[in-house]
Image: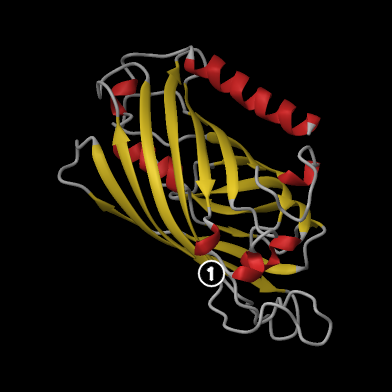
Amino acid sequence: MKLASRLLFIIGFVANVALAQTNGDATSILNLDKMAQINQGDSYVTFPFDFGNIEPLMFEANVSPSFKIRERKDSKLMGVLTSQIIIRMYDETSYPVRTPSYIPQLTLYFLTGNKLASKKLTLFGRFAHHSNGQNGTFYNEEDGEVNLMTGNFATNFVEFGLIKSSFSKRLNAFKFFKSSIEMHPKSWMLDEMQGKYSGLRWHNTFIAYKLPIDDGASKSRKANFSLKAETSLMLDNINNQDTFDIKRLNARLTFYYHPKFLEDIGLFVQFYHGMDYYNIYFNKQIDIIRFGIMTEILRF
């Protein structure tokens, strides 16, 4: 738990330092639309050479299209409907794709205060469903282990949080800090998952977008680099784990680079430690380093 506390402290400290440096001229372009884009995340495809204890994969893909619901472009209230799907193709005979994660979700965003303020605070709430499209028994009848091939996995959850943003003139970078609580009521998940799958989680995220030098040629710019640090702490009673068990911590660090010769995609490297997030595989602990390509449609 000492490691978890240190990670959370570092992310909070860096975020507060970042928010302390702002540029009033640049913040006006940080509208609600961009806040939603940052929070919803990007689509990606990994390369077939991960390093770690995950099964050999041809790729993992996150397909996350979003549909905006709002009255007008400058609205302070907006809804986003997302049909997120995570797919893993395994490096085995016939290259099977097993039990994709289906995570459809509806997120509401509200931009507080003055839209032209130097610092912005956005509140959000989300309702989502997470399942794997299977209807087999949760456990194998032969050995009593979790049925990874056809076992049913399903849960619904809500998430409430906030996003703070600022612009660092010295670093020429936009910075964001997000904190949220995710809740899976027991009545919203399968009976077999209760006590094994965490239903109460605390998420913290710090994101920095490093912009290129403004040459005045275009009205919008893409980030040359971006960095995202994420932690998730499981707070409820799961698998009889101690309160300070390190297994309660999930952490992810992603570094993204957008070469000039690519239009809407870039390259990323990512480190992940913690519970496997691929639906019914949640009982596994994984440590991986992966590489791939990621969409980056966010322009400033």
Identify which residue is drawn at 52% across, 56% down.
185
- Color encoding of the figure: secondary structure
Residue 64 quadrant: bottom left
Figure check: 46 above or below 16:
below
User: What residue did someone put label 1 on?
Assistant: 131
| Secondary element at tag 1 | strand
**Amino acid type at image mark 1:** Ser
- Left or right relative to 95: residue 18: left
Identify which residue is drawn at 43% across, 26% down.
164
Residue 135 quadrant: bottom right
- Left or right relative to 300: residue 137: right
Image x and y of residue 50, in percent: 75, 58
Residues 295 and 183: in front is 183
Image x and y of residue 275, in percent: 71, 54
Regarding residue 299, the answer to whether it shows in the image is no
Image x and y of residue 28, in percent: 28, 23
Placement of the C terminus among the 4 image quadrants: top left
Residues 74 and 246: in front is 246
Classify 10 Å Cα crowding around label 1: few (below 14), some (14-19), many (20 and above): many
